[in-house]
Structure formats: structure tokens, C-alpha cells
Image: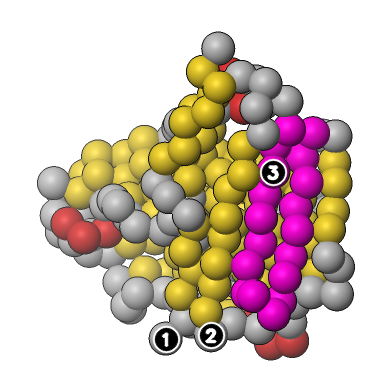
Amino acid sequence: SQKIEQNSEALNIQEGKTATLTCNYTNYSPAYLQWYRQDPGRGPVFLLLIRENEKEKRKERLKVTFDTTLKQSLFHITASQPADSATYLCALDMSGANAGKSTFGDGTTLTVKP
Amino acid sequence: EAGVTQFPSHSVIEKGQTVTLRCDPISGHDNLYWYRRVMGKEIKFLLHFVKESKQDESGMPNNRFLAERTGGTYSTLKVQPAELEDSGVYFCASSQDGWETQYFGPGTRLLVL
């Protein structure tokens, strides 16, 4: 069966360190993968999108990698700050008839301590 | 530019009652999606509109759920009659293209007692 797993429910790190979140999937062939941030009581906010033919994407302090052989995406936040504390979600999207039908992981709650 | 808005933000109803959720997408976005997150589970896809047409409704749980998007602008999701297991957060999202970034609304928190 199809499955998306994010490394752990919670990740605690010290301010200034790099946070690395993992998204593993099985039995999918996604056209692209997206990472979202969600704060309590809010909807998910789009952060980065990486396509199946891309290895890495960067945006300011954020970096996403995508390994379709390992079926894994890594999401890095460098020089983390307490304001980065939130739940981070990965979502897979297919192409063709299933385009736009995002499948989400459970999320990882990141806490950055000052 | 206004983002995706949803109304109400919270709704508490009794089992057997009817509730209607509303979503206003970003202006000009033809694609509109409904998702929901029930307690302890991941966000799950419900359905996808392209303008006023249902592109994919494979995630709708049963025929107690009815989604409409008359005129291709705002959308409503009606649950009738509501059951306890319908409790959760219902998100709406919209996108300009059907295959890329979706912008989510804040969600409607539904509690069925």
C-alpha cells in the first residue's frame, strides 16, 4: 500500500543548529514533492516544491533534496531560529489524472530552543 | 492580494444536524481543493474542482458530503446528516494551475457532538 512517513513526530534542536526533517515514501511515483509549514490553528503554508528530475532546491535558509531512488526527501533549515518552530508537512503529487491531489505525511513538529 | 478564506472558523453541531462550510479561493484561481484532517491523522484529499466542474471527488468519504462550486468562484461543502466521525479540520486550497502550488485557507474546525 502507499505510505508516506515523516521521520518523527517531534524534533527538538538548539537555536543556530541545522534542522533536518525526513520524508520517506513507498509505492508512489510522485511528479513532485512539496514542503509546507503549519502553525497551530492555521492552514499549511507552502515553502518549497521540488520536481522528480531535480536533486536539490534552495530558498534562503531552506534546502530540500529529493532522491527518487531512495524514495526520500530531506528538508533542512540552517541557522535555525525559535521562530522556525512549527509543524512541517511533506506532500506528494502525481502527474496526469491525479495531478493536484496532494497526499500528505503526518508532519514533524520542530521546536527550536533559544 | 487576499488569500484563501474559509467560513466559519469553528462549528459545533449535534449528530444528525447539517453544516455547510464555505471557501473563497484566491481570485483568478480556477482550481479549488477540499481536504480534511481528522484527529490524529494526516491531511487527506477530499475533492478537486476546476472552475465549476468536479475534476476528482475520489476522496469524498460518503454521500453525506456534497460539494458545490456554482459559477466557479466560491465553494461550499455540506455535511448532511453529520456524524461523530466527521469531526476534524476542513481545509480549502486553491491554485492557478492544477499541478503546482496550492494555497491553503485557515481551515474550519468542525466538532460533531
Q: Position of residue B71 (x, y in %)?
A: 69, 64
Q: Are marks 3 and 2 in contact (CB under 8 Å)?
A: no
Circles 1 and 3 on the same subunit = yes
What's the residue at 63%, 67% (across, down)?
A: A72
Viewer-proximal residue among B43 and B12: B43
Viewer-proximal residue among A102 and A48: A48
Residue wearing tag 3: A76
**Magenta segment boundaries in residue numbering:** A61-78
Q: Position of residue A94 (x, y in %)?
A: 68, 79
Q: Earlier in the sequence, mark 3 or mark 2?
A: 2
Check disc 3 and report its element: helix, strand or loop: strand
Q: State how far apart marks 1 and 3 are (Cα).
A: 28 Å
Check disc 2 and report its element: helix, strand or loop: loop
Please, which chain is the residue tagged with disc 2 on? Answer: A
Q: Which disc number belongs to residue A1? A: 1
Q: Which disc number belongs to residue A104? A: none
Q: Is residue A31 above or below residue A87?
A: below
Q: Are marks 1 and 2 in contact (CB under 8 Å)?
A: yes
Please, which chain is the residue tagged with disc 3 on? Answer: A
Q: Position of residue B56 (x, y in %)?
A: 58, 80
Residue wearing tag 2: A27
Left or right side of B32 for A63 = right
Question: Looking at numbered disc 3 in the image, what kind of residue is underneath it?
Answer: His
Question: Looking at numbered disc 2 in the image, what kind of residue is underneath it?
Answer: Asn
Viewer-proximal residue among B106 and A79: A79
